[in-house]
Amino acid sequence: MKTRITELLGIKYPIIQGGMAWVADYHLVSAVSEAGGLGVLGAGAAPADWVREQIRKVKENTDKPFGVNIMLLNPAAEEIAKVVVEEGVAMVTTGAGNPERYMKMWKEAGIKVFPVVASIGLAKRMIRSGCDGLIAEGTEAGGHIGDLTTMVLVPQLTSEFDIPVVAAGGIADGRGFAAALMLGAEGVQIGTRFVATYEANVHENYKDAIIKAKDIDSKVTGRSTGHPVRTLRNAQTLKYIKLEQEGTDFEEMERLTEGGLRRAVIEGDVKTGSIMAGQIAGLIKTKMSVEDVIQSILAEAKHTLKESQKYV
């Protein structure tokens, strides 16, 4: 399955693992890259030294390409931007800001840059900055989100720009993969499905919460504040929504969620922690190996695309 994404990134399959903070460490990243996709370290709010250490651990476990997701609001973003150059990372995804100031440095180092975008306007800014491709993330995704759905966003981007687009948000199986290709995407980014794998270095409570999730268990908090975040419903989420409805001060609501993702991922607190997961969690029923996830997605996608020919 060759696309411009596989050619640009030097990978076997056009499947990118989402750079999830606290979740996407070297265990998951190296497993995804070894299985033919592209693993992406989630730098999140981590210091540069941690990112450097994780990069080196990935290299100990695989000789395949991998990437790093850099949240540009991280106070250490500039240092991390230099670390990926010094350590010879193949690809960078970015969020929460404009990577333009680092683009020349990354380009000279041969690093491919794929910003995460949630709108046409943001995509235009990223293309002007010189990016190699776009990750079009729909509101179905877990974590920080925009307003447009994947099905709406991807075809608008692929119609307007001749740049490789990766579809993200609401994709966990081969049918979603096939649909993304039909919308014009040349690859997919998958997050939630990879959390519920044996290789993901997260608390079993977090994995189990995804597996037990129903279709209606995904909730969005923070829309009233301009910082929407998608998580699975729990005591913390319901309390936050109640505070929003009451018009509670933003700082007070943020204190409620402070450290919540770490509590869920590391400590297994699925009651007051932030269980970031996409709407597709309701489709995920079992834990699998990373290799089995990728191969099952590919097999189902090929079958789906073949079956679709019946309607032509």
Image (cartoon, rainbow, N blue to C red):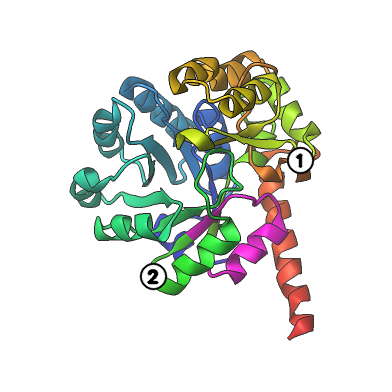
**On screen, residue 67 above or below 137:** above
Does the residue at mark 2 contact the one at mark 1 (Cβ under 8 Å)? Answer: no
Of the numbered discs 2 and 1, the one sitting upstream in the chain is: 2
Q: Quadrant of the N terminus?
A: bottom right
Magenta-colored stretch includes residue 246: no
What residue do we see at 79% from left, 82% from top? 310
Disc 2: which residue: 161
Image position, residue 94 (x, y; %): 37, 43
Picture coordinates of residue 87, whole percent (x, y):
30, 35
Q: Residue at x 35, y 41 (%)?
A: 89
Element on which disc 1 rests: loop
**In the image, residue 268 above or below residue 87:** above
The magenta segment is 166-185
**Amino acid found under the numbered disc labelled 2:** Phe
Real-space Cα separation, disc 2 to disc 1, in angstroms: 34 Å
Indicate the amino acid at tag 1. Ile
Q: Name the residue located 40 percent from the left edge and 38 percent from the top edge.
A: 68
Determine which residue is flagged by label 1: 216
SS of the residue under disc 2: loop
Q: Nearer the viewer, residue 186 or 243?
A: 243
Q: Identify the image quadrant of residue 302.
A: bottom right
